[in-house]
Amino acid sequence: MAQEYYLLPFNIAASVFIGKVFSKYISLTNFREYFSKNRFAVSLSVLCLIFILLLSFLRVANFMKSEDINSPIFKLAEETKIKTNSTDLIITVSNGNPIHLYLYHRKGWVCFTVNLNKDYITGLKNLGAKYLIGEKSIFKNEPEKLNEILSGYDKIVDTDIYFILKL
């Protein structure tokens, strides 16, 4: 859900066509007359309208649930802003999700746990990376890799939930 903005151009265009369908089949001025002629089309349109409203509400509620200020990603973002300079390049271990860089207001690289090894980190360090940052939950299937990384670099922050390492 972090990248729903890619769908925005389609949602805007779709809303115009949905409005046209509803204006055709749910005319409030002569609803009774139109309903008596086209019961199926009007009933289907009303049912679709109810489902669209219900699903839209559920989508917004689900999105807002993920925006919890006490979630690990927001805590890590605040910690990153405090512990690093805004010009520092960072490596985030987030399995391809760029939202971490956006929230941290930092530039750098997004890394997958599969690619994470000493050579990869050294290569990015040579390109200017100063910190390795991530949530520990990303490593749930690879705990040995997490232990290797945590033991190989200086710990700036190391909680049960996330870490910030100096390269």
Image: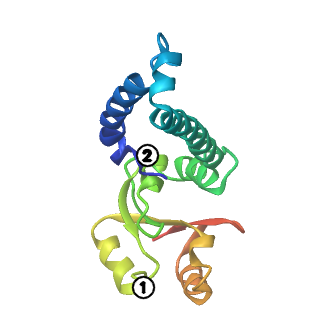
Q: Are marks 2 and 1 in contact (CB under 8 Å)?
A: no
Disc nearer the start of the sequence (2/1): 2
Relative side of 139 to 109, left or right: right
Q: Amino acid at mark 2?
A: His
The crowd level at tag 2 (other Cα within 10 Å; few <14, some 14-19, many 20+) is few
Q: Which residue extends farthest front? A: 37
**Which element carries disc 2, helix, strand or loop?**
loop
Residue lying at 30% horizontally and 39% vertically, measured from the top left: 9
Q: Residues within 10 Å of mark 1 (few under 14, many from 20)?
A: few
Give the vertical position of 119 relative to 34 (above or below): below
Q: Is residue 124 above or below residue 15?
A: below
In 3D space, how far apart are the residues under numbered discs 2 and 1 (Cα atoms)? 25 Å
In the foreground, 44 or 128: 44
Query: How many labels were placed on the picture?
Result: 2
Residue 13: where, in percent of width, then height? Answer: 30, 35
* Residue farthest along the top direction in this orientation: 29
Residue under circle 2?
A: 105
Question: For the C terminus, which image quadrant?
Answer: bottom left
x, y percent for residue 93: 48, 69
User: In this picture, is 24 found above or below 83?
Assistant: above
Can residue 118 be seen at all in this image of the molecule? yes
Identify the residue shown where x is 57% and y is 86%: 142
Q: How is the image coloured?
A: rainbow
Q: Is residue 157 visible?
A: no
Q: Which residue is mark 1?
A: 117
Question: Which residue occupies the foreground of this view, 16 or 42?
Answer: 42
Residue 124 in the image: x percent, y percent?
Answer: 32, 72
The structure residue drawn at horizontal position 48% and vertical position 17%, both measured from the top left corner, is 33
Identified by mark 1, the residue type is: Asn
Q: Position of residue 80 (x, y in %)?
A: 54, 53
Most distant residue in the bottom direction: 144
